Structure formats: structure tokens, C-alpha cells
Amino acid sequence: MRASRIAYKPVGMALGAVSGMIAGAAFKQAWKLIEGEGDAPDALDEDRPWAQILLAAAVQGAIFAVVKATVERSGAQATRRVTAMSWRLTAKAARRSARSAWRTSVAAATCPAR
């Protein structure tokens, strides 16, 4: 498994919770605009008509899907940038270390010990 996938696991779980809260708040605001009521109908709410329940479910599903995709994609890109950056820094440090070791060995070979 690549480092970016391993690093994304805890980030993805946290982002999932955050995206749920964001989507819930967005749905409440959208439902107020659609119906003018404070709460959306529940599937088991017998006082509401089928059309209203299905409309609420469709709007809620669409909002949750868009928010989830946006948050997960942004989190994956950020994680990829961070892990790629750390990999580049590690590779750069390894090259520096190799150069330094090479210079030390060349210096030791050209300058005999006294």
C-alpha cells in the first residue's frame, strides 16, 4: 500500500465525520428554502405526504453525495501533496547524505592519514 493511502486512512475518517456535519447543516438550510418548515420529514412520518418525503430524501441524498465527494477529494489531494512533499524531502536528505559520504571517502583517499 502506498504511503499516501496509509496516511489518508485517519484523515479520511475524520473528514467523513466533518462532511456529515456539513451536509446535515446544508440540508437543513436547503429544506427551509424549499418548504419553509423547520424540520424535514422522516420516512416514518405518517403526517406527511409521499411526495414530500421522497423530495426530502432526494435532496438530502444529493447534498450528502456532493459534500462527501468534495471533502474526500480535497482531503486526498492534500494528503497526497503532504506525503509527496515529505518523500521529496527525505530523498533530498538521502542524496545530501550520500554526497557527503562520498566527499568524505574521496578526501580520505586523497589525503593520507598522518
Image (cartoon, rainbow, N blue to C red):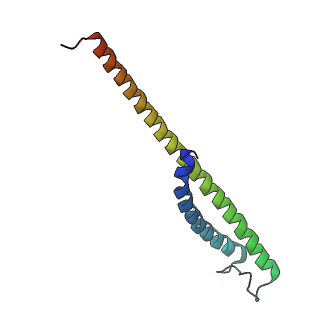
Question: Is 91 drawn above or below residue 54 in the view shown?
Answer: above
Residue 35 is situated, as x and y percent measured from the top left of the image, at 72, 77
Q: Is residue 83 left or right of residue 71?
A: left
Residue in view at x 54 percent, y 51 percent:
6
Q: Is residue 69 left or right of residue 80?
A: right
- Asked where in the image residue 50 lies, by quadrant, the reply is bottom right
Residue in view at x 29 percent, y 10 percent:
110
Residue 34 is situated, as x and y percent measured from the top left of the image, at 72, 73
Q: Quadrant of the C terminus?
A: top left
Q: Nearer the viewer, residue 113 or 80?
A: 113
Residue 38 is situated, as x and y percent measured from the top left of the image, at 64, 80
- Asked where in the image residue 52 lies, by quadrant, the reply is bottom right
Q: Is residue 9 left or right of residue 42?
A: left
Q: Nearer the viewer, residue 100 or 44?
A: 100
Q: Nearer the viewer, residue 60 or 33?
A: 60
Question: Is 60 drawn above or below residue 74 in the view shown?
Answer: below
Question: Is 69 drawn above or below residue 53 in the view shown?
Answer: above
Residue in view at x 64 percent, y 60 percent:
68
Report the residue that reaches farthest toward the left.
114
Question: Is 83 drawn above or below residue 40 in the view shown?
Answer: above
**Total number of numbered labels?**
0
